[in-house]
Image (tube, coloured by chain):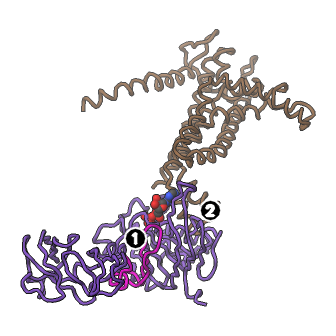
Amino acid sequence: MQDHGDACRLTGLGRTYGRGTSAHHALGGIDLAIRANEFFTLLGPSGCGKTTLLRLIAGFDQPTVGEIAIFGRNVAGMPPEDRPVNTVFQHYALFPHLTVAENVGFALRMLGRPRAEIAATVARMVELVGLEGMEQRRPDQLSGGQKQRVALARALAPGPKILLLDEPLSALDAKLRQRMRSELKALQRETGITFVFVTHDQDEALAMSDRIAVMQGGRVQQLGRPEEIYEAPANRFVADFIGGANLIPARMGPEGAMAEGLGTIPATGTSGAEVTLAIRPERLAILPAGGHQPGDLGPLVVAERIYMGNELSFRLEGAAVPLHVTLPRGGLRGALDFAPGDRVALRPETGAIRVLAS
Amino acid sequence: MKLHRLLLAPSLGTILIFMALPIALTTLYSILSPAQYGGVIWQPSGEAYVRLLFERDIFDDTLSFNADYLQILGRSVVQAGIATILCLMIGLPTAWFIATRPPAQKSLCLMLVTVPYWVNLLVRTIALLLMLRDEGPINGALQSMGLADGPLPLAYNNFAIGLGLVSSFLPFMILPLYAAIERFDFSLLEAAYDLHASRWQAVRSVILPILRPGLIAGGLLVFIPGIGSYLAPDILGGGKTLMLGNLIGMQFQGSRNWPFGAALSTVLMSVTLIALILVARRAAREEA
Ligand SMILES: Nc1ncnc2c1ncn2[C@@H]1O[C@H](COP(=O)(O)OP(=O)(O)O)[C@@H](O)[C@H]1O
Ligand SMILES: [Mg+2]
């Protein structure tokens, strides 16, 4: 059976709040198999049901329908304290009356482990997250990043099989967030624990995950490796949410998709069908309108030039929707520049245009 | 700076007139001699304090040890202590229940807790006595249901006094506990369960330590008035079992021995103050 390779298997999982006309389906029809030892990310906008899903796995909440199996064992009705799962809470939830060492050793104390073992594990965990010397501090004497590390060490101390992390980096400043990303990823590799990581930040998800489940409206929109999610978005929502693609309405014709103001783009599909073309802003070359070649899109007019340091971005008018193009600075293409009012054409990289149904 | 001091004046004045002055006066009276029909004579004397522990023979003036008053003090402490523990056991779940209701129900529940206070304490205490009497509705119901042969001795004993103390001071326990639970971060409870704590372990290792300030506040608010309470022992105890409050009252009314009453009050205040200091010190030590 495949089952035994899965750390956590969710089958037909749903959670509905309220009932009758005011019923709200926070989660519906979730089927996921999270593999052992993987860094699995739930990515989606605020309110899409990520926390609800984590709470179901942790056992704080019960599903309305469906099943959860952890390492092949159905955990229906099993209280949180009995599940081999620990959580890093969004706002850490550190015990304010306990020191760092006492916080980290909490779970082992609850499990009635011998003192010597607790002391040894606490020392190891404190070292693992780099908090040596802070053992006797209380949570209110720690910075945000330090609290984050305590929360992590506390959840890892009892040796969970699955670690749930609910937006653990969202309360940190940008620089620290960057560093914690690498540290978390390294920690996951070292410990070999299955991480289920929740975030609304696509960069975070892409940088850290083995696989990502993109969620919206309580459902999984796409499941795949970061490359798959980014390069081959399954639908409009994923294309837009991850990396902000240009989404252009088009209609299938005999030679391809016909888009207003852009011409015909080679693609196959039922003639007459309404489709959406998804093109990443960085996978378009921008050139002066004169040297128009077959396959180029346009002509279009530069409406805005946006300087962003390492990138130069243009907003182009002339198609059904405004198009965004991003050029990296430096290198060959870095020399190119345009001003508002310039007439330009676009040349997509091969395979850059994805045709999405509707 | 000057304005600062000026603004402080009303509160300082109030404290001086209504707290410091009466305490000073009480302490002063306790070391003077009693006048024959109440009041004091301005003649220093330690007699009031001697009387706390010794009985003076009316013929030869010899002192013999007398534990009566110590016993009353001890009984007061025990009664107030038991009432405090009972209030805690009833108050904590009640406050927890109220604090976890939706907002609209919360204010209703809080109002219900305070409703008894719209009625005077004397009236409430007498109403409780009427309930507990041999001919009262409780005994009546027990007998008509065949649960008791004769009336149970519910009134005029320590049980009745305890019940009276609990019913009069329970809100003082519930309200500070409610405030503490209201501020309690419930994700800490989830964290405890997540970290393999059982229900009881979560209560002991997380809830109680975090609610400690509220528990201490509630405990003091019940214990301190409880130890000096006057009405409950007087009415529900039928005057048979004295508590410190009654003893003090008697000195100013029947016996007309003001210095002795003042000495008892001073002792009561000192005991309370010492208890307060001990609690504050422990709290401060645990903070550090
Ligand atoms: N206890 C609850 N009662 C009613 N609705 C809830 C409750 N918890 C969450 N929801 C709703 O469920 C949806 C998903 O919430 P949540 O899982 O917290 O989203 P996320 O973590 O992705 O931001 C939201 O629309 C939220 O309003
Ligand atoms: Mg959330």
Of residues A290 and B172, the one drawn nearer to the viewer in this rendering: A290
- The brown chain is B
Specify whether A76 is left or right of B183.
right
Of residues B151 and A291, the one drawn nearer to the viewer in this rendering: A291
The shade of chain A is purple
Q: Chain of mark 1?
A: A
Report if residue B277 lies within the magenta region.
no
Secondary structure, mark 2, is: helix
Ligand 1 lies under 8 Å from the Cβ of mark 1: yes
Specify whether A205 is left or right of A311.
right
Dot 2 surroundings within 10 Å: few (below 14), some, or many (20 or more)?
some
Q: Residue at x 50, y 66 (%)?
A: A103
Ligand 1 lies under 8 Å from the Cβ of mark 2: no
Q: Residue at x 39, y 80 (%)?
A: A234
Q: Quadrant of residue A115?
A: bottom right
Tag of residue B254: none
Q: Percent x, y for residue B159?
A: 77, 35
Residue B105 vertical position relative to residue B198 in the rendered view, above or below: above
Q: Percent x, y for residue A94?
A: 47, 63
Tag of residue B201: 2
Q: Percent x, y for residue B7?
A: 31, 28
Q: Where the C terminus of chain B falls, by quadrant?
A: bottom left
Residue stretch in magenta: A208-235
Of residues B138 and A105, the one drawn nearer to the viewer in this rendering: B138
Report if residue A214 lies within the magenta region.
yes
- Depth-wise, is mark 2 or mark 1 nearer the camera? 1
The amino acid type found where label 1 is placed reads Gly
Q: Residue at x 33, y 87 (%)?
A: A268
Secondary structure, mark 1, is: loop
Of residues A355 and A177, the one drawn nearer to the viewer in this rendering: A355
Q: Percent x, y for residue A306?
A: 14, 70
Residue A72 vertical position relative to residue A249 in the rendered view, above or below: below
